[in-house]
Image: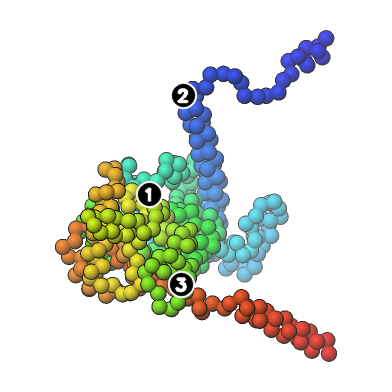
Amino acid sequence: MNEELEIEKSRMVKSHDIHLDAEYADWIAELKHRYRSAQVKAAVRVNTEKLRYNWELGRDLVQKKAEERWGAGVVEQVSLDMQREFPDADGFSTTNLWYMKKWYLFYNDADTKLQRAVAEIEDEKFQRPVGEFQGTENEQDIKLQRPVGEIEDEKMHQLGPEFPAIFGLVPWGQHIEIITRCNSIEEAIYYVGQTIDRGLSRPALINCIKANLYEHQGKIVNNFAEHMPELQSKLVQEVFKENYDFGFATVKHEIYDEHELEEALSNSVTSLLLELGTGFAFIGRQKQLITGDSTSKIDLLFYHIRLRCYVVCELKAKPFEPEFAGKLNFYVNAVDDLVKHEDDNPTIGLLICSDMNKAKVQWSFRGICTPMGVATYNNVRIQEMLPTQEQLQERMELLQREMRTTKRLMKG
């Protein structure tokens, strides 16, 4: 009897036939968002505590003068002791312990400089006015979150630089690349900020450092300060580069025009957006503008999500000439009047040319009230310089013959 009753009560879980309205849908969406946010915060907290541990282990090796006190092999011994106690944990290799010491020393050598650089980046990321160029709600939640007990930990460790909160937002592998490849505190903190803002993977970070993004960023020739509010001008200058690496684009001939360059860039939109930086959304190429009986075409049109404005991009496969500024000014004003929404910020013009004379650019900007900047590009590949399929096949056959000959000689 009991078995029959249990069978009757048994059922498959399924969606029920209930009244689901808009309020219920909004609530479920909110629950999902909160759960995803909690997952991310938990992951950030775990990463932060692991990094804090690495920082403090490196600090101990320095402050205790471990090698002088216990001998040259003490780091290897610490590695063995920790791995024996925690066999399932990673990160206790001898190499990793040396990196922990190097990490702490890199920033400890200039404690005041570290505090100043971290304060600047925290001001930008944590204290930006509400509603002005803000990221997603989730981004803000993550960046503002401080692990429980952090304040107490900071009070316990007053010797040497404290563990900066922003370091907890960067994976350990990226920290290693930064301290290994950077030459100054300012440069290192810049790449810490880029890793946080752009979510850079380790290979992507390495590429940014190799491209010397730190030196090129924010040095574009521009008139932003004259025609934009101070905070907005600063953010815009950080977005644009002095020089763009178009190594992903291939043109057919050594002498090419703007149309061919534009087509080569458009064929690799993903690479183009990565090179431009975080926040750029591609709207289109050769956007037609009809004025009276004439038609003009904007080379590339973007919308920048964080800056909340359109970006008109004009390409020139030649050095800068003064008339380029007038044409770009015309396009920027047209987009402002015909495309820009009232909630958008003023449209920005970006001219990318093969070379420029900065004085000539600055004189050309006088009297122009629209915000614009001029940058250069390099590394466009020429298709004729690349080996054909037949040439590659010949090289492969030659390599195979050489390998066979080498094997015969080794056997003989």
Point out residue 74 in the picture as x, y percentages from the top left corner. 63, 65
Q: What is the spatial separation of the Cα atoms under label 3 and label 1, in whole angstroms?
A: 30 Å
Nearer to me, 171 or 411? 411
- What is the three-letter code of the residue carrying label 2? Glu
- What is the three-letter code of the residue carrying label 3? Val
| Side (left or right) of 272 relative to 291 | right
Q: Quadrant of the C terminus?
A: bottom right
Nearer to me, 112 or 229? 229
Which of pointers 3 and 2 indicates the residue nearer the eye? 3
Figure check: 9 above or below 174: above
| Side (left or right) of 342 relative to 112 | left
Nearer to me, 261 or 297? 297
State which tag comes first along the sequence, 3 or 2.
Answer: 2
What numbered label is drawn on residue 251? 3
Work out which residue is located at the far top of the displayed protein and give it. 1
Which of pointers 3 and 1 indicates the residue nearer the eye? 3
State which tag comes first along the sequence, 2 or 1.
Answer: 2
Q: Residues within 10 Å of mark 3 (few under 14, many from 20)?
A: some
